[in-house]
Amino acid sequence: MKAESEGSYTVVIVPSDTERTRSLKLTPRGLRIAAVLAGIGGFGLALLLGSWWYLAAQAARVPELELQIETLASENARVEQLAESLAGLQAEYDKIRGLLGADQLASDNAPEILPADEAESEATASNGIGLSPEIPTSWPLTAGGFVTQLLEEAGGVTHPGIDIAVAQHSYIRASGAGVIREAGADSIYGLYVRIEHGNSGYQSMYGHASRLFVLPGDSVRQNQVIALSGNTGRSTAPHLHFEILQDGTPIDPLSLVQQRASS
């Protein structure tokens, strides 16, 4: 290469197999154009290499993404199965609530207290002639119900009474005459009433009520309405928890109370 004029260059090419030479004249403008083209070519090459690297990295993630898709599809199938199971359980629950009338409300908020003569005649019919009305022998509901859990003993009393499934807001009545010793709220039994039945040695307890109509110290007759059934406290459905204690020890209420059929 040799300079012919200021800023211009001539490139002489001599092939090894011939004596003929070839020359290429480069001007400053041509050099600038060549430099620009070389820069563009380099940038394009770098862009191409960068794109290839990105595509290669994304392609390497394909197996991981496919595994994630399979996992999500499996989890989605389990969710659908769970939804079907929950729908079935909800249908069964609604069916049971319908059978028990759990969504029916009492037609009147005021308790239906039996007149004295009717209470006496009903107590006599349920107790047998000659038994004191202080002995808790009456069915604790004016409606029927289903006994869903009995008194249980295992290393001590674990369920000291019976559970009676019954419609929400059914009338709860005193199983025997006596004095209200406790009437209030408990974390387990919700709204509850405890009656001491005179000097008979018996007490009775009524739990999970929705409303109480008596206060501690009140005297009640046998079969007098004292509360409305409910679902308060530790409870999963409307029912009455009914206990009878003799000298402080829980006994089976069905040993004294005749179960009334559901009406």
Image (cartoon, grey):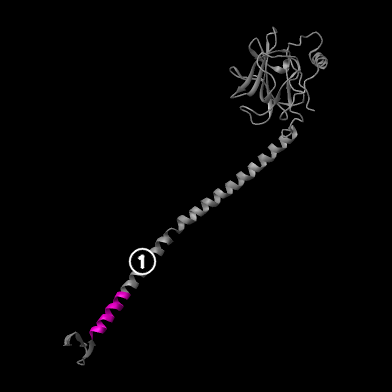
Callout 1 amino acid = Gly
Q: Can you give x and y, in whole percent of width and height, for residue 23 in the image?
A: 22, 89
Q: Residue at x 46, y 57 (%)?
A: 63
- Quarter holding the N terminus is bottom left
Q: Nearer the viewer, residue 111 or 56?
A: 111
Task: Find residue 233 and report its image quarter.
Answer: top right
Tell me if 13 is positioned left or right of 81 in this view. left
Magenta span: helix, strand or loop, mainly? helix
Specify whether residue 149 is in view: no
Reply above or below: 83 against 236. Answer: below
In front of the other: 218 or 235: 218
Magenta region includes residue 172 = no
* Residue 152 screen position, x and y as percent: 64, 20
For this view, does 134 lie left or right of residue 49? right
Q: Which residue is mark 1?
A: 50
Image quadrant of residue 253? top right
Residue for point 51% across, 50% down: 71
Q: What are the residue bounds of the magenta stretch?
A: 27-40
Residue 65 drawn above or below residue 102:
below
Residue under the image location 65 percent in, 21 percent down: 192
User: Up-down: is 206 above or below 26?
Assistant: above
Place of residue 211 in the rendered image (x, y in percent of width and height, measured from the top left): 68, 25
Q: Is residue 39 magenta?
A: yes
